């Protein structure tokens, strides 16, 4: 019998996207459960109007809520990308992260953001990992994304940036830190000694320099350093070969698409995206804010429902 509920802070994500809808649907899925305690973070008008659309006003009244910065009148418009929505997303997520650092919650599960909206607000942002790092007072490149879904766990050394920029800043140290953060996260998820598959940067991990020297300079030294501290590491090996074998617990991707494509192929709209490497665990969902269907109350909340279950280590609601 579970003696204490896992406390989850649940900021809405972009209020003009599907985040408010899937957050309320997730709260409904866990309502009355003794093992999970959810608290919503977001603007009051957004939650109230979304609850009315979904017929969940009674649920909202019974659910703990932290109302965050209000959106200016007329800017809550589902489907619209705007600075006010980006600012509201940052406010809610930052409040949830801060409360979790304070010990009020065990983890954060955040709704999907819209990066353009945040940039319109003039806020530096390259995804939830960078926000977690900022709120926790850490360097941006000390927090990484671990994508989970389809039976795969893939941590990313680089994330939302051009391929050229990612290649310019990839170092052995960055790869090592991503792998170590991924290993610690796997341990927190219950796997004490995960096996690690390290993706190469170039096809065939460079074919011993035939396809460029990036792997000779970066991934091979990183693998040697990781093995030297006792980790079970294979690679660098081409991502296609490693994934075809499916024999590792954790994979380390060098670039965004290396890690995102296989998981989204195997687990469409149901993956979890964990920000790891800080003293706060935050997970979002492996899909976007779906502006094309926002406000229609038809969004599928399974990714967020599954994400809560993964972080809380509890059964998924039926």
Image (cartoon, rainbow, N blue to C red):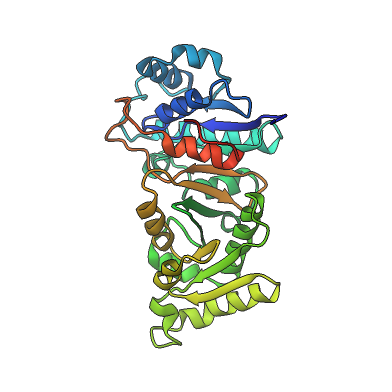
Q: How many marks do you count on the picture?
A: 0
**Height in image: 221 above or below 245?**
below
List the single residue furthest toward the left: 292
Residue name at image x 49 percent, y 42 percent = 284
Q: Position of residue 220 (x, y in %)?
A: 55, 79
Q: Is 120 left or right of 103, judged from the image as shown?
A: left
List the single residue furthest toward the front: 1
Q: Is 253 left or right of 52, judged from the image as shown?
A: right
**Closer-to-camera residue (48/274):** 274
**Height in image: 262 above or below 227?**
above
Q: Position of residue 265 (x, y in %)?
A: 35, 54
User: Which quadrant would residue 66 be assigned to in this image?
Assistant: top right
Residue name at image x 66 percent, y 62 percent = 193
**Closer-to-camera residue (121/2):** 2
**Height in image: 92 above or below 138?**
above
Residue name at image x 34 percent, y 20 percent = 74
Q: Position of residue 199 (x, y in %)?
A: 48, 70
Q: Position of residue 229 (x, y in %)?
A: 71, 72
User: Which quadrant would residue 2 be assigned to in this image?
Assistant: top right
Q: Quadrant of the N terminus?
A: top right
**Closer-to-camera residue (84/141):** 141
User: Which quadrant would residue 285 be assigned to in this image?
Assistant: top left
Q: Is 140 left or right of 239, judged from the image as shown?
A: right
């Amino acid at each position: 019998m579970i003696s204490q509920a896992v406390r989850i802070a649940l900021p809405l994500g972009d209020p003009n996207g599907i985040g408010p809808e899937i957050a309320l649907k997730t709260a409904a899925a866990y309502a009355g459960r003794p093992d999970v305690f959810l608290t919503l973070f977001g603007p009051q008008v957004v939650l109230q109007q979304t609850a009315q659309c979904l017929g969940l006003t009674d649920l909202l009244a019974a659910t703990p809520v932290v109302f965050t910065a209000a959106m200016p009148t007329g800017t809550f418009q589902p489907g619209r990308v705007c600075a006010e929505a980006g600012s509201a997303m940052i406010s809610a997520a930052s409040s949830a992260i801060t409360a979790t650092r304070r010990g009020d919650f065990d983890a954060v599960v955040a709704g999907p953001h819209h990066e353009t909206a945040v940039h319109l607000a003039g806020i530096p942002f390259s995804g939830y990992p960078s926000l977690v790092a900022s709120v926790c007072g850490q360097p941006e490149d000390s927090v990484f994304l671990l994508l989970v879904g389809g039976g795969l766990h893939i941590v990313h050394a680089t994330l939302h940036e051009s391929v050229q920029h990612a290649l310019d800043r990839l170092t052995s140290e960055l790869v090592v830190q991503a792998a170590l953060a991924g290993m610690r996260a796997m341990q927190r998820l219950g796997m004490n000694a995960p096996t690690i598959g390290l993706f190469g940067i170039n096809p065939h991990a460079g074919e011993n320099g035939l396809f460029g020297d990036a792997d000779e300079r970066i991934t091979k030294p990183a693998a040697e350093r990781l093995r030297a501290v006792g980790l079970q590491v294979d690679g660098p090996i081409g991502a296609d070969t490693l994934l075809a074998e499916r024999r590792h617990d954790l994979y380390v991707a060098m670039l965004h698409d290396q890690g995102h494509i296989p998981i989204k192929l195997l687990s469409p709209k149901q993956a979890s995206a964990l920000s790891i490497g800080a003293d706060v665990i935050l997970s979002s969902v492996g899909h976007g804010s779906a502006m094309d269907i926002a406000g229609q109350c038809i969004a599928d909340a399974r990714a967020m429902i599954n994400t809560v279950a993964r972080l809380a280590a509890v059964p998924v609601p039926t």
